[in-house]
Image (cartoon, grey):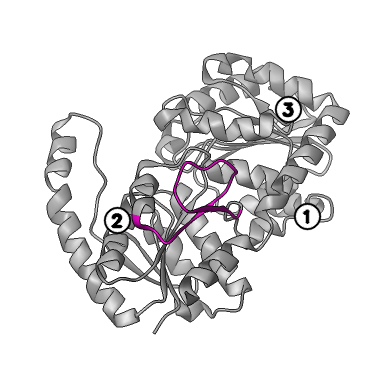
Amino acid sequence: MSFAVITGGGSAGHVLPALAVAEALEDAGHEAGDIHYVGARRGIESRLLPETPYGHTLLDVDGLQRGISASDLRRNAAFLPKLASAVRQARRLLRELQPKVVISVGGYASLPAVLAARRQRIPVVVVTYDRQPGQSSAITARFAAAVAAAYEGSPLPRATVTGAPVRRVIRQVDRVGGRAAAREELGLPADRFVVAVIGGSLGSGILNEAVTAYVDGHGDDRSLAVRHVVGERFAASAAAPRDGTDGVLYQVVGYEPRMDLVYAAADLLIGRGGATTVAEVSVTGIPAILVPWAGAAEDHQTGNVRWLSDADAAVLLAEPDVARLGEEIEALRHDDERRHSLGTAAAAMGAQHRGGGLAELIERVASA
């Protein structure tokens, strides 16, 4: 018998919050063995979950594709049969585990376990961490026992503000005491201004181009270091790294598994507007320039970033203005007071994500 099944995934934007939920339950006193994860075989969870102490089941389920290519149409045709099969597997798994609660973090991978839980009358908690909830969260929230919302004003029913789930290793980042060790581990000099760039779990082509242009324009700058997470799909075509011998140090990384070190080491973060990035910026208090993805559903990334930028806790740079990224970086690079102000305001905003409200809500639903 387990305490909880956590379900969702497909991308790091869902899997990392799921792991943060699991850690929050551990911090509340539950054993890792009493927490089980249900995700998708195609998702990044197939890489991330084996490294954790949590049992996991990965189902053959896929999301609906928005494109009209032959491949997209074939995958869409298989959507319902795969979902039906995955729901049957999830029902068998829930009968075996007998969890007290199923926790959905959204994404297409959450549907089988949530539907199975509804059929078996197991209470469901929906965890939503975007200011504008995604479609899967909006659907499952209709019959959820409770919704754990990251921010005030959630449009979902039965919502309680608990803050966003943030991984323990991020919550423990010390940007002062941990700076030297983090730089040493990442191979970053102690005496350079460090810009870290991450374009989400898949990377961002438009952000990569803007950063490459910035690096090219500062090729002979011996006081600058840039650690650029380009995304694995862009790794083969990314600009060549530079060792910093006679100018800028430019590190090119496909996927960054140790964001805690990046947050501790960097003087400035350049990122997108995903919920995980926004929450982690606030929890760590790192000065940031955030460029929301213009193609996000209902422009929800802009809403996420505005939570910070409206409080002067981050710089929002719209995607059409990304050509100005270099100017924005340089302005903050040479303004210590402004960076300090942004970081201090961000850390104050992050207080709501550092509490224990999420685990408390899940406990209440499980014991009802």
Location of residue 342 (image quadrant): top right
Secondary structure under the numbered disc 1 in the rendered image? loop
Q: Residue under circle 3? A: 247
Give the mark nearest the N terminus, 3 or 2.
2
> The residue under label 2 is which amino acid type?
Leu
Secondary structure under the numbered disc 3 in the rendered image? loop
Give the mark nearest the N terminus, 3 or 1.
1
Q: Specify the segment rendered in magenta.
A: 143-162
Disc 2 residue crowd, few under 14, some 14–19, many 20+, Cα 10 Å: many
Nearer to me, 312 or 272: 312
Tell me if residue 149 comes above or below residue 208 in the rendering. Answer: below
Mark 2 in CB contact with mark 1 (< 8 angstroms): no
Location of residue 324 (image quadrant): top right
Q: Residue at x 42, y 80 (%)?
A: 2
Tell me if residue 214 comes above or below residue 48 in the rendering. Answer: above
Q: Is 166 within the magenta?
A: no
